[in-house]
Amino acid sequence: MAAVATAAATSSASNPNSLSPLKPSTLSSRLNLRIPTTHLIKTPLKYHSSPPKSPLIPLCSTTKTPQTTSSPSTTTFHGLCYVVGDNIDTDQIIPAEHLTLVPSKPEEYQKLGSFAFIGLPSTYTTRFIDPDQFKSKYSIVIGGDNFGCGSSREHAPVALGASGVMAVVAESYARIFFRNSVATGEIYPLESEVRLCDECSTGDVVTVELSDSLLINHTTGKEYRLKPIGDAGPVIEAGGIFAYARKTGMIPSQSASN
């Protein structure tokens, strides 16, 4: 543990805002993070007789309750969803020509978000981000199998986070995309127990409740169980691997190191 703290402290002191001063996979392995496995929840699903009126709930809003690292997250996300299919790769999420943008610079982080999903094929007739906008009106992405496949670029989850996405709910993930999402703390990579990309449509109003591992589609009035985020939840809630390590005392806080 001391070796991990020393290596992380040395790296973070030289550039605390860098995306990868220490390989996230190394530190996440020491934290014993794993992709969540399926948990069978024997609770009957509920159906809403009538969906709530969405104008009463601000879209793209988040509610976060203070928590300890040992308690389940009580974060709730509400907004419009954007639905994609299987094998969405990192080139479709953020094409390689935009990787010169430096996320640690606020103006370039904002610009990176404006290019999110710009690589999707023309079969996706609804644009994820409207022209001349930096943020998307879709705060929740719903995908199919093998979401985030392709290269290991950390810019993929960062671009989604910069565009305003709070969570991705997919049938399964490429392992490196899942790890990068946790390491950067940009988005919650949640797994569904059913194929939600066939159940939901772009523009549906949905709510994700992390504490209950639940997705509610207010447009259709249906609820769906999600696989629990597990040990990755507190890391994302803290803001990523290094923020979590500072919060838990694994490495010195930035204020203490200055």
Image (cartoon, helix red, strand yellow):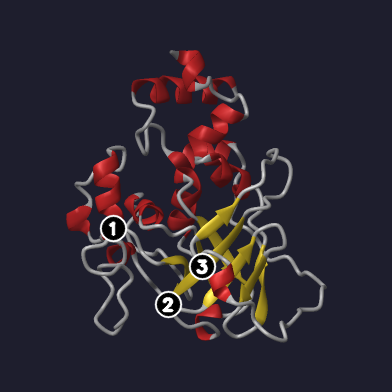
- The residue under label 3 is 79
Q: Answer whether residue 37 is visible to the viewer in this image.
A: yes
Determine the residue located farthest toward the front in the rendered image: 56
For disc 2, the neighbor class at 10 Å (few under 14, some 14 to 19, many from 20) is some
Quarter containing the N terminus: top right
Left or right position of 256 against 109: right
Q: Are marks 1 and 2 in contact (CB under 8 Å)?
A: no
Between discs 2 and 3, the one toward the N terminus: 3
Residue type, mark 3 in image: Gly
Residue type, mark 2 in image: Asp
Q: Where is residue 112 shown, x and y percent of the image?
A: 27, 53
Q: Are marks 2 and 3 in contact (CB under 8 Å)?
A: no
Q: Where is residue 254 shown, x and y percent of the image?
A: 47, 21
Residue type, mark 1 in image: Phe
Residue 174: quarter of image: bottom left
- The residue under label 2 is 86
- The residue under label 1 is 134
Name the residue nearer the viewer: 61 or 154.
Answer: 61
Is 127 drawn above or below residue 6 in the view shown? Answer: below
Q: Residue at x 56, y 74 (%)?
A: 54
Left or right position of 251 against 147: right
Between discs 1 and 3, the one toward the N terminus: 3
For disc 1, the neighbor class at 10 Å (few under 14, some 14 to 19, many from 20) is some
Left or right position of 188 against 180: right
Q: Nearer the viewer, mark 1 or mark 2?
A: 1
Left or right position of 44 against 156: right
Does dot 1 land on a helix, a strand or a loop? loop
Dot label at residue 249: none
Q: Nearer the viewer, mark 2 or mark 3?
A: 3
